Amino acid sequence: MNEETIQISVRPDVSVTAIRTMPDAQPAQSLFIYAPGAGSNNNDPFGSYLSQRMVHEGIALVRFQFPYMEAGKRRPDSPALLEETWNQVIETVRIPNTKLIAGGRSMGGRIASHVAAQGTTVDALALFAYPLHPPGNPTKSRDKHLPGIKAPTLFCSGTRDAFATPEELATAAATVPSATVLPLEGADHGFSVLKSSGRTREDVWSEITEFLLSWLET
């Protein structure tokens, strides 16, 4: 496994840091680009876990943070800059003739789905804890762009996720031409589970990764 930190230019005055993890065996079978949720960065625990698991399966992984996080700010960038960042990251790290999977957790995955719906070429989307609507406000659904997604799309969300009930997510996912939904029993938006379940958050991460790897082979 080889890991390096790289800088990616988004605009003349804006750049972001990314971490690229490459498998020892070259070339990589696929490339997964991962963006974290709104409150996280390159140290996102799930992104780090995913990179360690995927690289051992011959899949390269690039995880990056958005400009506002790069600048130490809390408030996310404008939708236009978030989307521009995703597009520049894809353009910079894409490996020729290699399958490209884009996605991420919560906001990171949502913005990936927007650029894919707008025509950016990706071979697959993996959306973890997709924030379909703000908690307690299902009328503000973030699903209008979903029918425009052409790539096979995997949704992985907990059954206790306040940003989408299993039923709401299934309905939204059905508007994507080629979608698969993995309900994570008992998990919340951060993939935490109740102690009474007998499972840990790491167990949920493992469930997601095993399913993702299997799904990518289909």
Image (cartoon, rainbow, N blue to C red):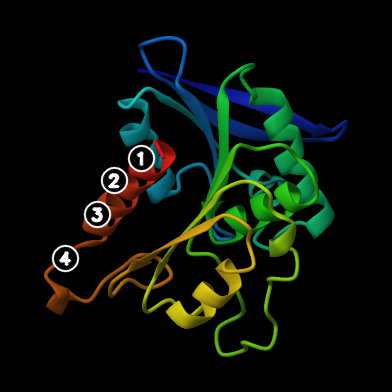
Q: State the quadrant of the C terminus.
A: top left
How far across and down, in percent of the image, does residue 4 sit? 49, 20
Three-letter amino acid code at the position of disc 1: Leu
Q: What amino acid is at disc 3?
A: Glu
Q: Is residue 131 visible?
A: no
Q: Earlier in the sequence, mark 4 or mark 2?
A: 4
Q: Which of the marked residues, 2 or 3, is nearer the chain's N terminus?
A: 3
Label 4, secondary structure: give it.
Answer: loop
The Cα atoms of the two marked residues, 4 and 3, are separated by: 8 Å
Residue drawn 56% across and 67% down? 173
Q: Residue at x 67, y 79 (%)?
A: 141
Within 10 Å of the Cα at label 2, are there few (<14), some (14-19), or many (20+) other Cα atoms? few
Question: Image point 65% across, 43% down: which residue?
Answer: 70
Image-based side of 210 in relation to 169, left or right? left
Residue 166 in picture, x, y percent from top left: 44, 78
Q: Secondary structure at mark 3?
A: helix
Cα–Cα gap, marks 1 and 4: 21 Å
From the image, tell me which residue sits under label 2.
210
Residue 110: percent from the left, percent from the top? 63, 59
Instruction: Using the image as rendered, state which of residue 127 and residue 64 is in the foreground.
Output: 127
* Mark 1 or 3: the one toward you: 1
Residue 213's tag is: 1
Of tags 1 and 4, which is closer to the observer? 1
Which residue is denoted by mark 4 in the rendering? 199
* Marks 1 and 2 in Cβ contact (< 8 Å): yes
Mark 4: few, some, or many residues within 10 Å (few <14, many ≥20)?
some
| Residue 185 at x, y percent in the picture | 28, 72
Q: Earlier in the sequence, mark 1 or mark 4?
A: 4
